[in-house]
Image (cartoon, rainbow, N blue to C red):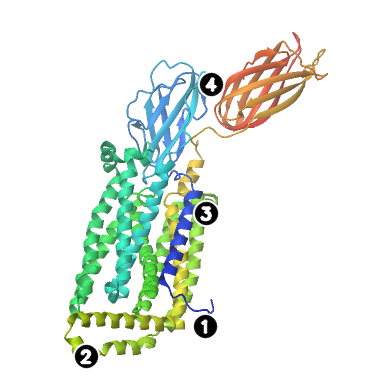
Amino acid sequence: MSATAPSAGPSPIRRPLAAAALLATLVSLVFGLLLAGAGPASAHAALTGSDPADGAVVDTAPKEVTLSFSEAIAVGDDSIRVLDPSGKRADTEAEPKDLSEGSTVRYGVALHSGLPDGTYTVAWQAISADSHPISGAFTFSIGAPSDTTVALPSQEAGGGPVGVVYDIARYAAYGGFVLLVGGSAFVLVCWRDGATALPMQRLVVRGWLTLTAATLVMLLLRNPYTGSGKFADAFDLAGLQSVLDTKPGAALVSRLLLLGAAALFIAVLFGTYARREDEREKKDLTFGLAVGGGVVATGIAATWAMSEHASTGIQANIAMPVDVLHLLAVAAWLGGLASLLVALYRTPDIGSAAVRRFSTVAFSSVVVLAATGIYQSWRQVGSWSALTGTRYGQLLILKVALIAVLLAVAWFSRRWTGRLTDSAVASVDAAEEEPESPSESVSADPERAAQLARQRAALTATKKKRIRDADPQRSGLRRSVLAEAAVAVVLLAVTTMLTSTEPGRTEEEAAGGTPSASAPAAGGPVNLKMPFDTGGQNGKGTVRIDIEPGRTGSNDLHVWIDGSDGKPMDVPELKLALTLESKDIGPLPVVPDWLAEGHWSASAVQIPMAGDWKIDVTVRTSDIDQVTIDKNAKIG
C-alpha cells in the first residue's frame, strides 16, 4: 500500500455487513481447512520405551509389563491392558504401578503367572500432563509369534467426531477470550465513549457467550474425548465426576466461575459506567473496572496456563505466568484490533485520539508478545533441528511469519493514524449541538416530539458517517485495519493449533526411544524372486515368494519353486526364516506346508513390526545338496 493518501478512485466500503461477511467467510475457511487437514490432536506425552519392547520375542513369560513416557501422565484402572492371543486379560487388572524415578516416567502392570507361548497385545491409554489424551498399542511374543484375535485400535484417543467437536470448541474458546478481554480493554483504555455504542456492546457480549458455550461443551465432552469417544457419554454423571477430579476439569470449572464474574463486569461496564456523566466519578469507576477486569482476565488466562503446555515440562513455575502474560497480550492486540474494526465500520463517533491510544496499546502488546514468545519457543522447541524438523517447529515458523506480515500491515495503519483528524465532522457535531426550535403544535405533542428527535439523531448520524466515509485518511485506515484483522484470524488459528501439537522438544526426545504402534503399519503385498544353485544334479532353480498383505501382524506366505526348465519343481526340504537385524529380532522360523507340485504355503505368519526384513530361504535338493539364499524386503 502506498504511504501517501489515496487519490480519488474506487469508493470505500460503505456497508459494514460486507466487512463482517468477509471476516466470517475467512474465519470459516481457515478453521475448516485447519480442521480438515489435521488429524486427531497429537500426543503431548509420548511412549519412549517398553519392557518387553515392541515386537520382542522373549523366551519366558515376564512378571510385568512396563511403559516409559516422555513426560508425566495421568492413569486409571484400565490405562494399561495386556491381552493374550484369544483377547483375554493377561494382566491382573490392578491399577498401574507408578515406577517413576527422577525424571524417568514409568508405569507397569503385573501379569498372571504361567502364561502360555504366543503373541500378546499391550493396549494403553492415558492423559498427558498438559490435558491431551494419548493412546497406543503394540505386541510382544512369548516363545514364538502366534496368531492373535486382538485387533489393534485404528483410532487414537481424542479422535473421531467427538474429537472434531472438541477441537472446534477449543478454537471458539480462544476466539471468545480474545473478543471478551480485548474488546473490554479497548473500551476502558482507548475509547470510553464506546461503552454506549451498541456494536461494541454486542462484540464483547458475543465474546462472553462464545467463551462460555465453548467451555461448557469442552466440560461435557471431556469424558468421551479422553475415553470412549461416544457422544452419549457426555451425560454420564460418573464420568463427569471423574473429569472434575482432574486438572483439566478443575480448570474448566474455574473458567466458568470466572465467566460469572465477567458477566457482572460486563453489566457494570455497559450499564452504570456507560450512563455516568460526571467525569470524576467516571474516572474512579474506570480505575475500579480496570482493576477488577484485569483480575478476572488474568484468572481466565490462567485456566489455560495451569492445564496445558505451560503446566508441564521444564521451568513450569516460570512458564505459567509467562503464558498468562502472552495470552493477555494476544487478547489486547487482536481483540483490540477487532474492536477498532467494528468501531470504524459500525459507529460514526470514534475519534483520532482513540485510534492513537490503541496504536500505543498494540505496540506495548507486541513488545510483551516478543519477550514471552521467545521464551516459550526456547522452552517448547529446544533445538534448531526441532524447529525445522517437527510439526510444532514448522507451525511456530508459520506463526512468526504471520506476525511479521501483521506488523508490516500495522505499520501502514500507524501511518494512516498519524494523518487522521476529526475536523471533517466538526461542522456536523456543531450542528447537532444546536437544537431546533420545535413548533407550538409539536411541543404540545410529546410523542411527536420524541419521534422528530429520533429522526434528527438518525439523520445526524448518517451525515457524520457519510462525511467520515469520504475522508481518505479514515478510508485508508479502515482498509489497512481490515487487512490486519484478516491476518489476525489466520494467526489465531495457527496459535490454537500449536496448543494441540506435540512440542518439538518432547517429540525429539521420544524419537530416541521406542515409538508406540497405534495401529498395524500399512503395507502392500511383497513379491520376491531368488535364483538358487545347490551344486548337485538338477540343483538349479528359482524361488518365488509372495507375502500378503505385507504388513505387521498376520500374513499369508506362498512359495513356488521352478526348475531350470521353468516347470514346477519339488524339493525334499524347504525352510524360511525372517530377521529384522536393525532391532535384533529373529530369526523367526517359518516351515511352510506342501500344497501342490512346486507350491508351499504358510498361514498366519506373524510379523511383529515394520522394517527392512531379511528373508532366508533354505532349499535342499538331495540328501547332501542344499543352499541358503537371502533377500531383503520392506514390510509395513
Task: Measure the alpha-carbon separation of dots 1 and 2.
Answer: 49 Å
Find the distance from the CA under tag 3 to the CA under tag 4. Answer: 40 Å
Crowding around mark 4 (Cα neighbors within 10 Å: few <14, some 14 to 19, many 20+) is: many
Q: Earlier in the sequence, mark 1 or mark 2?
A: 1
Instruction: Count residues near mark 1 (Cα–Cα under 10 Å), then give few for <14, some for 14-19, many for 20+.
Output: few
For mark 3, give the secondary structure: helix
Q: Amino acid at mark 4?
A: Pro
Q: Secondary structure at mark 1?
A: loop
Q: Disc 4 marks which residue?
A: 145
Report the residue at 44% width, 77% height from top.
477
What residue is pinned by disc 1?
4
Helix, strand or loop at mark 2: loop
User: Which mark's residue is nearer the viewer, 1 or 2?
Assistant: 2
Percent x, y of residue 636? 59, 33
Determine if residue 526 is in view.
Answer: yes
Q: Residue at label 3?
A: 394
Q: Tell me the residue that label 2 is attached to.
A: 439
For the residue marked with disc 2, what is the amino acid? Ser
Q: Nearer the viewer, residue 139 or 253?
A: 253
Left or right relative to 259: residue 630: right
